Image (spheres, grey):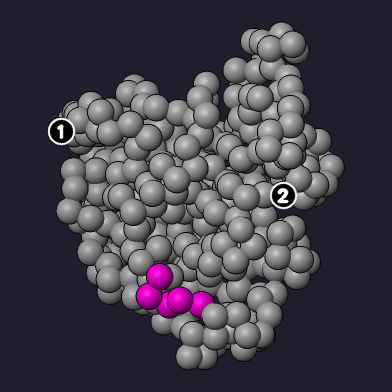
Amino acid sequence: MSDKIGYRIFGASHAEAVGVVLEGIGFGERIDLDRLQAFVDRRKAVSASYSTSRAEPDEIVIESGISDGVTTGREIVAKIYNKDVRRGDYDYKYRPRPSHADYAAYMKYGEDYDASGGNKFSGRMTAPLCIAGGIVLQLLERKGVKIAAYIQRIGQVEGASYRGRNVDKSAVLALRETPFPLLDRTFHAAMMREIEGAASVGDTTGGVVECCIFGMKPGIGDAFTDGLESRIASSVFGIPAVKGVEFGSGFALSGMRGSGANDEFSFEKGHIITTTNHNGGINGGISNGMPITFRTAFKPAPSVSRTQNTVNLKTGENDTVTVRGRHDACIVPRAVPAVEAAAALAIAGCVLD
């Protein structure tokens, strides 16, 4: 992240509020607050088989840094107040839930750690992430950079992918207006059956979100940890439940020969392009002018209603736990704008500087 643009998320799932401090945005930038609210609303729980029944309004409250829709040059502080909290459903302090952060956080923070709702490790924290990302997305678009993500896989159901095809920019960008974005809608029914099948037996399912960044001029980024891949991956891994990120053809490149994996150069209408995009628009950590493409793997949400084995940290004995409360059968649809936000925040320093 650039030294000039940074953000800090605060609050917790069952705290009074969650929020974000966004630094480095200069004076006089107009922010469309209605559009920002609409972006954050994309990750809200909806009346669908994959979504939690926790009904939060997610209304953004700007406390400083934006006045009458224009940035003041000071740090931007924005909050979302939690309205629909049920702390009684989350008493797992001494019986950590499998694959949650409960045990690891208990060992780090000790007796005072409050595991209610997952605390700061909850997916709830993607709401303020989307506030910061939504602001930056508007600024990036003024530089000609646009970002859109969509669902590529749900459980065992593979949908259409950017891999092996020319990405239709207008079609991908149009997906930002749909609640369950897919490159090919014919996979929708099968994906919904996959989610509903897991939910019917008290289980959950994961999936893959693909993301495309359009309009990145060649020459942006650097080597090592300042490279675009390093920045984007680091930012995206901050989203709860992310377990993998790959760029372009990613791991599939390991099974190819160099002659097939290489993206050959060509002139097209006076511009240099590559005839394929296996490397996802990045060479040596620097943009080459092609769309930046990457894939993010989300594990199944660990909050399953089945009884599972755990330990009792108080008694020192084996125990069981049954997760109660309201949870998503599949977090992937709601994670799509979070991926866009994380990508925007990762490249903001490079592009806006």
What is the total number of numbered labels drawn onto the structure image?
2
* Front residue of 75 and 269: 269
Q: Indicate left or right for 67 with 26 as reference.
A: left
Q: Amino acid at mark 2?
A: Lys
Q: Which residue is mark 2?
A: 217
Label 2 – label 1 distance at C-alpha: 47 Å
Circle 1: residue type? Ser
Q: In the displayed structure, does residue 180 sit left or right of residue 299?
A: left
Quadrant location, the N terminus = bottom right
Which percent across, then down, holds residue 17?
A: 41, 75
Whichever of callouts 2 and 1 sits on the residue coming sooner in the sequence is 1
Residue 309 against residue 107 in the figure, above or below: above
Helix, strand or loop under label 2:
loop
Q: Residue at x 68, y 37 (%)?
A: 269
Residue in the image at 55% along x and 54% along y: 146
The foreground one among 152 and 236 is: 152
Above or below for 257 versus 156: above
Give the main secondary structure of the magenta stretch.
Answer: helix
State the residue position of label 1: 200
At a point 76% along the width and 66% down the height, the residue shown is 353
**Residue at the location (60% across, 66% down)?**
142
Could one spot residue 339 in this view of the protein?
yes
Image x and y of residue 90, in percent: 31, 57
Q: Which residues are magenta?
A: 31-35
Q: Is residue 251 left or right of residue 189?
A: right
Alpha-carbon neighbours of circle 1 within 10 Å: few (<14), some, or many (≥20)? Answer: few
Residue at the limit of the structure toward the front, as seen here? 269
Outermost residue, right side: 223
Q: Examine the rendered structure and indicate whether residue 255 appears above or below residue 137.
A: above
Question: Disc 1 on helix, strand or loop?
Answer: helix
